[in-house]
């Protein structure tokens, strides 16, 4: 009870405050939290992004930012067309909770229902017939505790005894599935399951050319057969509106094609973290529109082309973390729309020729595992005409030759790890469109001057974490578009002068035993002491109506100056672990070392009365070497410049105020002379006194003269 209450409080603490309850908020059960939620913020949406997450994790494993292949996201389009705001109820199942009573209290117009079983709450059973009352239900999520964790562990049983024809998204996690005799159809035990047999029950399915015929299976008594089938799987026949079905960590050990019979709208099927060892023939033939299939984290021992046959709309296939040991031309059926295939973390030892010949539209493939070395044969990748990204982990091969990479003319990103002691001079001639080549942790010790011949479009080259102790002069001269070079964690002691081309914007040379000398004077600290950082783009929906929100990616990349990655000296001994640039400038005082300097303005205390010219005179110019300036100095410089600009503007305002005062005094003087003229005209009958006054003022300059009449009518000057 205590643990259940804790989970409930933890759950409610993550509910967004901005979401409000719908109309019947007072009728929400005490065990539940009711709120409005956008469909893209549910866990259902996260499961549709697994293709992008797979590539992201692979790129992070190699320490690089990901330039992922982007696909058309039909799932988002489906959400926009459908109801995007859902009336959501999240309920906690505790020890004393009766599911039927709880469901009676939940509002009938709920769109998304999540039931979470608390720890030590006992065995709970939910029947599909109990949910028939929710005719507006679109999303159903059931989450149990860990199965078979203890002898008296709590189990969450979901019994499929009714069809929820309107349900679109079903997520079952750590739930025991059970089928009911009411929805269980009896098959002829003497008939063999072939394509013709399947067509009896799916007359509208597409024809396929593979037919499985073999020896008859063991005939069981009828009652034993029914009981075995009932306990082994639950059929989702009648869930005809399902778009996504996830059965994760549910102790599923056997698949039957009848499980997915009639799921004609199913697009996302996730069966990860179960105990599957085999896939029967045509197992997914009942879901012809399937676009994403995940069988990751199972125990599959073999993959045959009849296992996955019929998935002509498939775009994402995840078979990672299984136990099959080889891939051949008999492993995969045609996938005319496949974009990403993940075979990673399997003990695959060899890939035979023509294995991927049927995957002629695939964009990205992931192969290899950390535990088992992988071997490649000639023509292993023939047919991958549109492949853009290839990731191979733990590749063991004596010589990387051109014949191994034949068949991938569109390849742009190639990621390799393993044991590759030698690379032929023309190894990359067949993949001359490469833009990113990562060969870290490949046990490379020597490079020839023509190793990267033909890679005229290469922008990123990573040779870090190898055993390279010598770089031949001119190695990078044949790479005219190279922008980033990673040589960290090698055995380099020195390199020839001018080896780094001027096109480079980032060079990593840290963690090498450098022998410091003035021969390194041409190294540029602002390029070598850099890191690449991923920055989220600012998406302003309020002011620019989403114009700044691009559809391709929500991140951009920038280079940041970071002295911590500066290469360090290993010799002479007195300068061990000292920065190469510091030793050249302060210790060796190399005359040829002239790093690019940045101009820094330091502001002195000034007052508003000081003019802009005085500020410019009092400003001190100082120059500091780039390797000693970090990101904080840059911010300080910008702050000083901004302060100087504010003072300059203040002085401009002050001068403008003085000018206004001067003009005001001139105006007062003019008005005073005008009044004197009017007085004179009144007493003297119109004498042209203004001319005399003007002449006197002009003749006397600055001094101001005043006149008045005496008692005898004569004009007299008053000092």
Image (cartoon, rainbow, N blue to C red):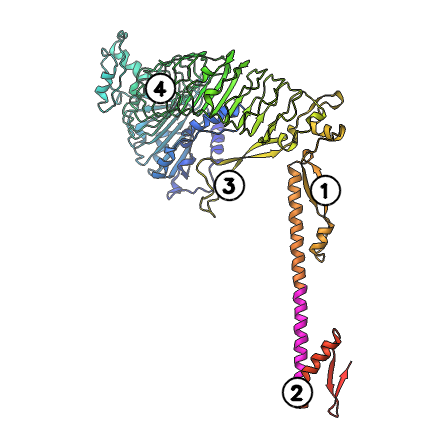
Q: Earlier in the sequence, mark 4 or mark 2?
A: 4
Main structural element of the magenta stretch: helix, strand or loop?
A: helix
Q: Nearer the observer, disc 2 or disc 3?
A: 2
The part of the chain drawn in magenta is 658-677
What residue sits 69% from the left and 45% below the top? 601
Q: Which residue carries the number 3 mark?
A: 538
Residue 63 seen: no
Query: How many marks can you see?
Result: 4
Q: Circle 1: is it few (<14), some (14-19), or many (20+) Cα within 10 Å?
A: few
Task: Tell me how far mark 4 sits from mark 2, CA to CA.
Answer: 112 Å
Q: Circle 3: is it few (<14), some (14-19), or many (20+) Cα within 10 Å?
A: few
Q: Does 446 appear above or below 74?
A: above
What residue sits 41% from the left and 42% below the top? 21
Q: Which residue carries the number 4 mark?
A: 358
Q: Circle 4: is it few (<14), some (14-19), or many (20+) Cα within 10 Å?
A: some
Task: Tell me how far mark 3 sits from mark 1, CA to CA.
Answer: 35 Å
Disc 2 to disc 3: CB gap under 8 Å: no
Task: Tell me how far mark 2 sits from mark 1, CA to CA.
Answer: 69 Å
Q: Residue 386, image x and y in percent?
A: 40, 25
Q: Secondary structure at mark 2?
A: helix
Q: Secondary structure at mark 1?
A: strand
Q: Earlier in the sequence, mark 1 or mark 4?
A: 4
Q: Residue 263, image x and y in percent?
A: 29, 26
Q: Which residue carries the number 1 mark?
A: 622
Q: Which numbered disc covers residue 681?
A: 2
């Amino acid at each position: 009870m205590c643990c259940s209450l804790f989970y409930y409080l933890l759950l409610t603490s993550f509910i967004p405050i901005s979401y409000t309850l719908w109309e019947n908020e007072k009728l929400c059960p005490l065990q539940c939290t009711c709120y409005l939620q956008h469909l893209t913020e549910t866990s259902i949406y996260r499961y549709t992004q697994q293709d992008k997450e797979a590539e992201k994790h692979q790129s992070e494993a190699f320490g690089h930012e990901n330039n992922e292949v982007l696909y058309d996201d039909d799932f988002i389009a489906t959400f926009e067309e459908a109801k995007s705001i859902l009336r959501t109820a999240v309920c906690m199942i505790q020890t004393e909770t009766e599911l039927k009573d709880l469901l009676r209290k939940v509002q009938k117009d709920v769109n998304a229902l999540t039931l979470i079983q608390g720890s030590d709450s006992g065995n709970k059973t939910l029947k599909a017939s109990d949910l028939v009352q929710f005719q507006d239900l679109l999303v159903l999520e059931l989450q149990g505790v860990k199965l078979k964790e203890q002898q008296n562990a709590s189990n969450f049983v979901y019994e499929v005894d009714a069809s929820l024809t309107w349900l679109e998204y079903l997520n079952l996690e750590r739930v025991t599935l059970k089928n009911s005799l009411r929805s269980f159809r009896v098959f002829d035990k003497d008939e063999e399951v072939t394509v013709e047999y399947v067509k009896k029950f799916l007359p509208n399915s597409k024809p396929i050319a593979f037919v499985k015929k073999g020896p008859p299976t063991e005939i069981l008594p009828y009652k034993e057969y029914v009981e075995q089938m009932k306990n082994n799987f639950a059929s989702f026949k009648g869930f005809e509106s399902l778009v996504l079905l996830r059965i994760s960590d549910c102790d599923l050990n056997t698949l039957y094609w009848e499980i997915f019979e009639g799921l004609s709208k199913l697009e996302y099927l996730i069966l990860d973290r179960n105990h599957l060892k085999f896939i029967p023939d045509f197992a997914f033939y009942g879901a012809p529109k399937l676009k994403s299939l995940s069988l990751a984290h199972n125990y599959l021992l073999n993959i045959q082309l009849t296992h996955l046959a019929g998935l002509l709309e498939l775009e994402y296939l995840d078979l990672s973390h299984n136990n099959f040991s080889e891939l051949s031309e008999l492993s995969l059926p045609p996938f005319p729309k496949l974009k990403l295939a993940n075979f990673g973390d399997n003990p695959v030892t060899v890939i035979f020729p023509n294995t991927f010949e049927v995957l002629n539209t695939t964009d990205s493939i992931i192969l290899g595992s950390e535990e088992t070395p992988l071997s490649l044969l000639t023509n292993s990748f023939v047919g991958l005409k549109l492949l853009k990204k290839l990731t191979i982990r733990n590749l063991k091969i004596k010589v990387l030759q051109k014949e191994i990479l034949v068949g991938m003319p569109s390849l742009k990103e190639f990621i390799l790890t393993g044991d590759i002691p030698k690379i032929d001079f023309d190894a990359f001639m067949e993949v001359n469109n490469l833009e990113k080549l990562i060969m870290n942790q490949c046990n490379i010790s020597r490079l020839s001057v023509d190793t990267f011949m033909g890679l005229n479009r290469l922008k990123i080259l990573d040779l870090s974490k190898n055993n390279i102790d010598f770089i031949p002069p001119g190695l990078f001269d044949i790479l005219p578009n190279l922008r980033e070079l990673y040589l960290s964690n090698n055995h380099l002691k020195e390199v020839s002068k001018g080896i780094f081309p001027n096109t480079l914007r980032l060079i990593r040379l840290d963690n090498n035993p450098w022998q410091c000398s003035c021969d390194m004077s041409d190294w540029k600290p602002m390029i070598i002491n850099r890191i690449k950082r991923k920055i989220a783009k600012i998406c302003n929906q309020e002011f620019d109506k989403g114009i700044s929100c691009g559809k391709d990616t929500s991140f951009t990349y920038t280079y940041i100056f970071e002295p911590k990655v500066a290469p360090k000296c290993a010799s002479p001994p007195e300068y061990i672990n000292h920065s190469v640039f510091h030793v050249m400038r302060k210790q060796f005082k190399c005359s040829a070392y002239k790093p690019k300097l940045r101009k820094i303005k330091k502001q002195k205390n000034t007052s508003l009365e000081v003019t802009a010219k005085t500020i410019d005179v009092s400003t001190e110019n100082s120059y500091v070497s780039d390797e000693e300036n970090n990101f904080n100095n840059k911010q300080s410089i910008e702050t000083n410049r901004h302060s100087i600009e504010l003072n300059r503007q203040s002085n401009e305002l002050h001068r403008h105020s003085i000018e206004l005062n001067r003009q005001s005094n001139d105006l007062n003087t003019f008005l005073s002379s005008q009044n004197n003229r009017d007085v004179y005209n009144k007493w003297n009958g119109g004498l042209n006194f203004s001319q005399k006054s003007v002449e006197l003022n002009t003749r006397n300059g600055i001094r101001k003269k005043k006149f008045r009449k005496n008692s005898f009518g004569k004009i007299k000057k008053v000092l």
